[in-house]
Image: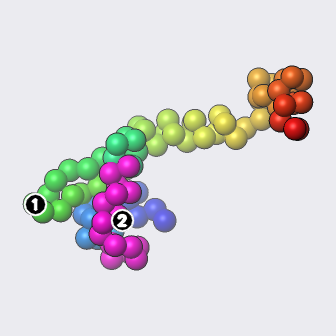
Protein backbone atom coordinates (compact mmCIF):
# COMPACT_ATOMS: atom_id res chain seq x y z
CA UNK A 1 0.00 0.00 0.00
CA UNK A 2 1.52 3.28 -1.04
CA UNK A 3 -0.98 5.81 0.23
CA UNK A 4 1.66 8.02 1.91
CA UNK A 5 3.59 8.35 -1.34
CA UNK A 6 0.88 10.77 -2.55
CA UNK A 7 1.75 13.36 0.11
CA UNK A 8 0.72 13.96 3.67
CA UNK A 9 -2.44 12.38 5.03
CA UNK A 10 -4.21 12.88 8.31
CA UNK A 11 -4.77 9.91 10.55
CA UNK A 12 -8.49 9.97 9.70
CA UNK A 13 -7.70 9.53 5.97
CA UNK A 14 -5.37 6.63 6.71
CA UNK A 15 -8.02 5.00 8.89
CA UNK A 16 -10.53 5.18 6.01
CA UNK A 17 -8.19 3.05 3.88
CA UNK A 18 -6.95 0.49 6.37
CA UNK A 19 -9.26 -1.19 8.80
CA UNK A 20 -7.56 -0.92 12.16
CA UNK A 21 -8.41 0.99 15.30
CA UNK A 22 -7.27 4.54 15.87
CA UNK A 23 -5.11 3.42 18.81
CA UNK A 24 -3.39 0.76 16.67
CA UNK A 25 -2.71 3.33 13.96
CA UNK A 26 -1.33 5.78 16.53
CA UNK A 27 1.01 3.15 17.93
CA UNK A 28 2.39 2.13 14.54
CA UNK A 29 2.71 5.69 13.27
CA UNK A 30 4.57 6.57 16.48
CA UNK A 31 7.06 3.76 15.77
CA UNK A 32 7.48 4.87 12.15
CA UNK A 33 7.89 8.50 13.24
CA UNK A 34 10.44 7.62 15.94
CA UNK A 35 12.40 5.56 13.40
CA UNK A 36 12.50 8.57 11.06
CA UNK A 37 10.69 6.83 8.19
CA UNK A 38 7.59 8.99 8.61
CA UNK A 39 7.24 12.66 9.55
CA UNK A 40 4.30 13.82 11.67
CA UNK A 41 2.86 17.32 11.98
CA UNK A 42 0.01 18.25 14.34
CA UNK A 43 -3.03 19.60 12.48
CA UNK A 44 -5.69 20.58 15.02
CA UNK A 45 -6.71 17.43 16.83
CA UNK A 46 -5.23 15.17 14.13
CA UNK A 47 -1.73 14.33 13.00
CA UNK A 48 -0.70 14.59 9.36
CA UNK A 49 1.80 11.98 8.23
CA UNK A 50 4.17 11.97 5.28
CA UNK A 51 7.02 9.78 4.13
CA UNK A 52 10.52 11.01 5.00
CA UNK A 53 12.05 10.22 1.62
CA UNK A 54 15.63 10.81 2.75
CA UNK A 55 15.23 8.11 5.40
CA UNK A 56 13.36 5.70 3.13
CA UNK A 57 16.22 5.85 0.64
CA UNK A 58 18.65 4.97 3.47
CA UNK A 59 16.31 2.20 4.66
CA UNK A 60 16.08 0.69 1.16
CA UNK A 61 19.87 0.83 0.86
CA UNK A 62 20.21 -0.90 4.25
CA UNK A 63 17.71 -3.65 3.36
CA UNK A 64 19.43 -4.21 0.01
CA UNK A 65 22.72 -4.53 1.86
CA UNK A 66 21.48 -7.25 4.18
CA UNK A 67 19.62 -9.31 1.56
CA UNK A 68 22.19 -9.13 -1.23
CA UNK A 69 24.85 -11.81 -1.11
CA UNK A 70 28.38 -10.47 -0.83
CA UNK A 71 31.84 -11.84 -0.16
CA UNK A 72 31.86 -10.54 3.42
CA UNK A 73 28.59 -12.31 4.27
CA UNK A 74 28.94 -14.58 7.32
CA UNK A 75 27.77 -17.55 5.26
CA UNK A 76 31.07 -17.33 3.34
CA UNK A 77 33.21 -17.47 6.49
CA UNK A 78 34.23 -21.09 7.21
CA UNK A 79 33.91 -20.86 11.00
CA UNK A 80 30.57 -19.07 10.85
CA UNK A 81 29.22 -21.54 8.27
CA UNK A 82 29.87 -24.43 10.70
CA UNK A 83 28.09 -22.55 13.50
CA UNK A 84 25.11 -21.76 11.26
CA UNK A 85 24.65 -25.40 10.29
CA UNK A 86 24.38 -26.56 13.93
Main secondary-structure element of the magenta-colored stretch: helix
The magenta segment = 15-31
The answer, for residue 1, to whether it is visible in the render is yes
- Quick check: is 26 in the magenta stretch? yes
Residue situated furthest left in the rendering: 44
The answer, for residue 52, to whether it is visible in the render is no
Q: Which residue is drawn at 77% across and 35% down?
A: 69
Q: Quick one: label 1, few (<14), some, or many (20+) residues within 10 Å?
A: few
Residue occupied by mark 1 = 44
Q: Is residue 46 left or right of residue 3?
A: left
Q: State how the image is colored.
A: rainbow
Q: Is residue 62 left or right of residue 6?
A: right
Residue occupied by mark 2 = 24
Q: In this view, does 66 lie to the left or right of 57?
A: right
Between 70 and 80, which is closer to the camera in this rendering?
Answer: 80
Q: Which mark is residue 68?
A: none
- Quick check: is 16 in the magenta stretch? yes
Residue situated furthest front in the rendering: 86
Q: Position of residue 31 (x, y in %)?
A: 38, 49
Q: In which quarter of the image is residue 86?
A: top right
C-alpha distance separating marks 1 and 2: 20 Å
Q: Where is residue 51 in the image (x, y as percent from the top left)?
A: 37, 50
Q: Which residue is drawn at 55% across and 42% down?
A: 60
Amino acid sequence: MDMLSCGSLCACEILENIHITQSTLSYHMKMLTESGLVEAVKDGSWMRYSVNTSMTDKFIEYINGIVTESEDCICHMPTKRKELSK
